Amino acid sequence: MGMDPEIGMLHVDSPNRSSLACDLQEPMRAKVDAFILNWLQTEPLRKADFWEDRRGNCRIRSPLVIRLCETADTWRRLVAPVAEWVAQALWNSSRRVANKTKAVPTRLTQRHRSEGRGREVTLVVNLPRLRKICEVCGAEGVKNRYCRSCAIEVARDTMAQVALIGHSKPKTPAVKARISKTLSDHAVANSWWSPSSLPEWLNEKFYVQKIQPQLRRVKVREIAQAMDVSQPYAAFIRSGRRRPHPRHWQALGALVDITAGE
């Protein structure tokens, strides 16, 4: 556009910086920030993506730089009309220009050429598309919210939560008989259990403060298998709405890698 990128209007001129180029980026800052914030919230970063130089500055490595540079064409098309507008404004404000109504060539957007052909110029630039990743494990290339393996686990947990709703509804006689049988088996096991079998450090306070909060990261089916209970009841245990019998505390502690008191 014939402008000197080193001479800024908003940014102070400084060595090794194109101040005018920085000026022209300001109108696009909101779109770039929105893209970056959305990217940071949807894709986890890894330690291998960064490195620290001798001065203590944090830098990004080449693979991440390449991915960011691939979006440069989008920002170029967005900033092109701004650059042409600034060039026209500078042309009109010059005292040495006799014909201030002359239009500056639109070499970036080719807007004058399109208008000369009777075409209406509309700027439509789509923001770069982010790679879809699994919300659980962070795997790339997924079609929906989860990868195949995580989708199965999420579906199981969801089914367990749905089963909680059905668990509270009236039961048929057959279902009541099966539940009674299960409850009686657990009642017998509870009666035969001795409190002395628990370690001294594993008391009610330790379970509530140390084990119960960690159960939220354990799958419902794993809790059900460890306690030999149904998944709806295991979902109650994981959420903290039910407190299991003390004979299950040691098995639940093993699930969250707690085998000794702190």
Image: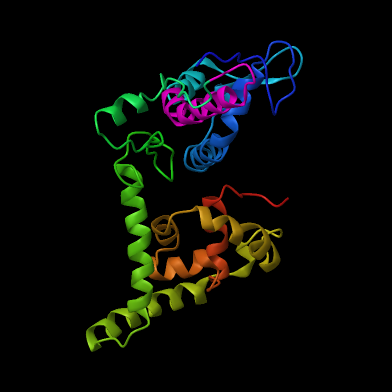
- Of residue 114 and residue 123, the one placed in the foreground of this image is 114
Left of 100 or right of it: where is 113? left
Q: Residue at x 39, y 80 (%)?
A: 184
Q: Quadrant of residue 253?
A: bottom right
Q: Residue at x 24, y 88 (%)?
A: 173
Q: Say above or below: 84 vs 193.
A: above
Residue 140, image x, y percentages: 37, 34
**Left or right of 206, for residue 252:** left
- Number of marks in the image? 0
Residue 54 position by quadrant: top right
Q: Nearer the viewer, residue 203 or 6?
A: 6
Is 96 magenta? The answer is yes
Could you tell me residue 179's position as x and y percent? 33, 80
Q: Position of residue 47 (x, y in %)?
A: 58, 26
Which secondary structure dominates the residues rendered in magenta? Answer: helix
**Is residue 148 shown left or right of residue 212?**
left
Q: How is the image coloured?
A: rainbow
Residue 150 pos. (x, y %): 36, 46
Residue at the far front: name it: 98
- Verify whether residue 189 appears in magenta: no
| Nearer to us in this view, 11 or 256 | 11
- Is residue 166 shown above or below 228? below
The residue stretch that appears in magenta: 72-98
When asked about the image quadrant of residue 16, the answer is top right
Q: Measured along the vertical axis of the image, is residue 160 above or below residue 174?
A: above
Image point (67%, 68%), residue name: 204
